[in-house]
Amino acid sequence: MKILYTGSNGLLGQKISAATAGFKEHAFLATSRGKNRTINLGTAEYKAMDIKDVEEVLAVIEDFQPDVIIHGAAMTHVDQCEQNKELAYQLNVLGTKNMAEASRRVGAHLVYISTDFIFDGTAGPYDEHGKPNPLSYYGNTKLEAEKIVQELTHWSILRTVLVIGIAEDLKRNNIVLWAKGALEKGQAINVVDDQFRTPTLAEDLAQGALLAATQKARGIYNISGPDFMSIYELVGHVAEHFGLSMDSVTKVDSTTLNQPAMRPPRTGLDITKAKTELGFKPHSFSEALEVIAEQAGL
């Protein structure tokens, strides 16, 4: 089987690249903008591709002729999407439209990576039948992209939550390492206790994407960690894991943060279907902390 994936320079993409070594029976093509950051990871070939450029997308995909496309490239910073809606629309909606058209032309199965932010957070944790009602522009673009994907004949949608992990040359800080660093310094930080999630190790999301791809699984699947917690509780677990004090942490509610984009209060995902039908086996949050600590050399 030939599998192409987008966003290979990002966190998820780098984890998929690393995992390709365990799928030697398949041929992989990694794609992203700019130079290849995954050159020492896995077995995938690499080709630069801008998902906003439909002609470039069609040229790359018609040349490789993939059986499956994993589309993970997106603008995922929630506040930046709110502040730059035009770019968010180009990447998250039009970029997905381009990938869907290319999938249709070559007859490829499209695996689309979506988000818990398509929900308003009033009824979490959600199963695959939860009713979408996004609160942010980011959530709106991802929901619109889901609808584009569902117009195809062969598709999977994988919804995920608060992806954590470490990857090469990424500017965005990992919430786990951010919390650890602040706690070690005794830095005063405000942490919300009214937002609940099921944090997802990036390696687990890559596992879920490859399971869906290699099985050409059809439909919507929730791919996340198994542990439901508030952001405050998440920081508390980090403190406990690394033997740090929570004395510098102030518990606050979301209204005090003045963030440009609204966040859903209670999301989190029920992953029963993915475990049963795909064989998905996520790390517990404690195990995820061990993986991150080892990779960071802590």
Image: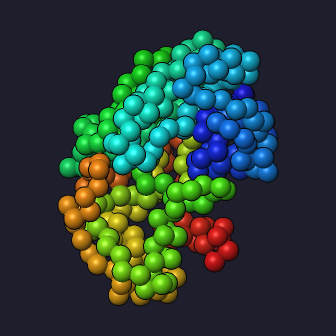
Question: Residue 194: which quarter of the image?
Answer: bottom left
Q: Residue at x 78, y 46 (%)?
A: 39
Tell me the colour scheme of the image. rainbow
Query: Whole-percent x and y of residue 295?
Result: 66, 67
Q: Is residue 149 visible?
A: no
Q: Nearer the viewer, residue 136 or 198?
A: 136
Question: Residue 118: which quarter of the image?
Answer: top left
Q: Is residue 134 visible?
A: yes
Horizontal side of 241 relative to 55 (left or right) equals left
Above or below for 269 versus 68: below
- Total count of labels: 0
Query: Whole-percent x and y of residue 265?
Result: 25, 55
Horizontal side of 268 relative to 239 (left or right) equals left
Q: Residue at x 41, y 81 (%)?
A: 187
Query: Whole-percent x and y of residue 183?
Result: 45, 81
Q: Residue at x 53, y 20 (%)?
A: 98
Q: Nearer the viewer, residue 174 or 21?
A: 174
